[in-house]
Amino acid sequence: MNRVYNFSAGPSMLPESVLNRAAAEMLNYEGSGQSVMEMSHRSKVYDAIIKGAEALLREVMQIPDNYKVLFLQGGASSQFAMVPLNLMTKNRKADYVLSGQFSTKAYQEAKRYGDCKVIASSKEDTFSHIPALDKKEFRPDADYFHICMNNTIYGTVYHELPDTGDVPLVADISSCILSRPIDVSKFGVLYAGAQKNVAPAGLTIVIIREDLIGDVQEGTPTMFMYKTHADNESMYNTPPCYSIYMCKLVLEWIKNEIGGLENMEKLNVEKANLLYDFLDNSKLFKGCAEKDSRSIMNVTFVTGDADLDAKFVKEATAAGFVNLMGHRSVGGMRASIYNAMPREGIEKLVAFMQKFEEENA
Ligand SMILES: *Cc1c(COP(=O)(O)O)cnc(C)c1O
């Protein structure tokens, strides 16, 4: 059976060598006589997996020692609440930038727990760019400043971080984690659902500066306190064992086969440029994101005719390019080209788009 090129926004493709390795280790992991799915999370053999995954994540992302890495559940969406419950504890104020649907959801959730200010929004322009930020609007007494770094639905990304001074910067990096190097020391908290670029669904990664762990708002459930998980090395309760194992294999792939995040970025930029160069020269297809906000992970485009968009998606699916339909809220097309999408998949997609353009001119 042939594998398809899967352009899904998440869950999404995993590297083939990782899937092969997981298959080979399925029935008997390292002589334990069991699969990783079946073993006790308190066993010695599993302990090496979770510790190994954390050590690799620290190495690959160059996470400073004063940050904790937490392997949680509940998706990035749970962080929309966990961040305010744990961080909005001094002045009960937080600043939010609205650059798409997920940052808006994060803001709406945080509003339930304190005074949240919208610093800027690009909603008027259907979130086709990262909004310009006026530093005079930032509140120096905010407990944190929240952004969504890569906007999965619209295909935009911050190319420059807001300068928030002493106010901790919190970023949702669900759809760009591990796509390129980032300076972790510039952030108070980074969080990501793993199902875009790291592992199967079920794992949420939180990277948090140690001094931000401690106080919580009254009534915060134990499972929603960062301290609970930090004090118990992500083993307060059963962690998402298998996803953490897959995360470890993906990190080994990035380290050993790709050669680290600098190489990963280079490959990702080359892949994205294949598609953007085609879109910029096409007479039929047009990119949706403004050029200075373009994401290298999610590429959004339209023909300008909804019926033709639907025809394209249908024919692409039949040709083995699946999940190219845009998010249900915006329509059009979206090619999510995360780390595991091979360059060949994009080359073939571009050739297919070229042919479609000729046939439908
Ligand atoms: C997918 C996504 C989410 C939602 O993640 P869940 O793990 O499904 O809760 C949040 N933010 C961004 C940027 C995403 O891409």
Image (tube, rainbow, N blue to C red):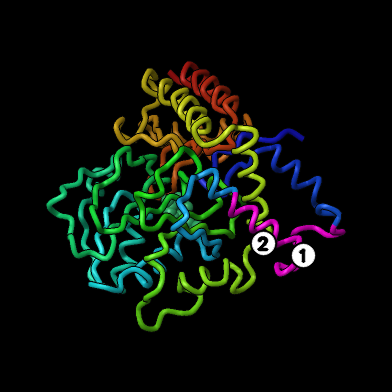
Callout 2 environment at 10 Å: few (<14), some (14 to 19), or many (20+)? many
Residue denoted by label 1: 39
Q: Is residue 323 above or below residue 287?
A: below
Which mark is drawn over residue 83?
Answer: none
Asked if residue 311 shows in the view, the reply is no
> Residue placed at 46% from the left, 46% from the top?
175
Residue 290 spot, x, y in % from top left: 30, 33
User: From where the camera sits, is residue 91 visible?
Assistant: yes
Magenta run includes residue 162 = no
Of 40 and 197, nearer the camera is 40
The type of residue carrying mark 1 is Met
Residue 355 in the figure: left or right of residue 19: left
Q: Determine the residue located farthest toward the bottom in the rendered image.
A: 219
CA distance separating discs 2 and 1: 9 Å
Q: Are marks 2 and 1 in contact (CB under 8 Å)?
A: yes
Of pointers 2 and 1, the one earlier in the residue sequence: 1
Pinpoint residue 296: horizontal percent, then vertical percent.
43, 34
Tell me where residue 209 sits by quadrant: bottom left
**Regarding mark 1 in the picture, which secondary structure is present there?**
loop
Amino acid at circle 2: Cys
Of residues 92 and 121, the one drawn nearer to the viewer in this rendering? 92
Q: Is residue 32 left or right of residue 279?
A: right
Over which residues does the magenta segment extend?
A: 32-55
Residue at mark 2: 241
- Determine the residue positioned at 39% across, 29% down: 303
Vertical order, 71 against 330 (above or below): below
Q: Position of residue 328 (x, y in %)?
A: 44, 49
Q: Residue at x 40, y 36 (%)?
A: 295
Q: Secondary structure at mark 2?
A: helix
Classify residue 108 by image quadrant: bottom left
Quarter containing the N terminus: top right
Assess whether residue 45 is covered by the magenta stretch: yes
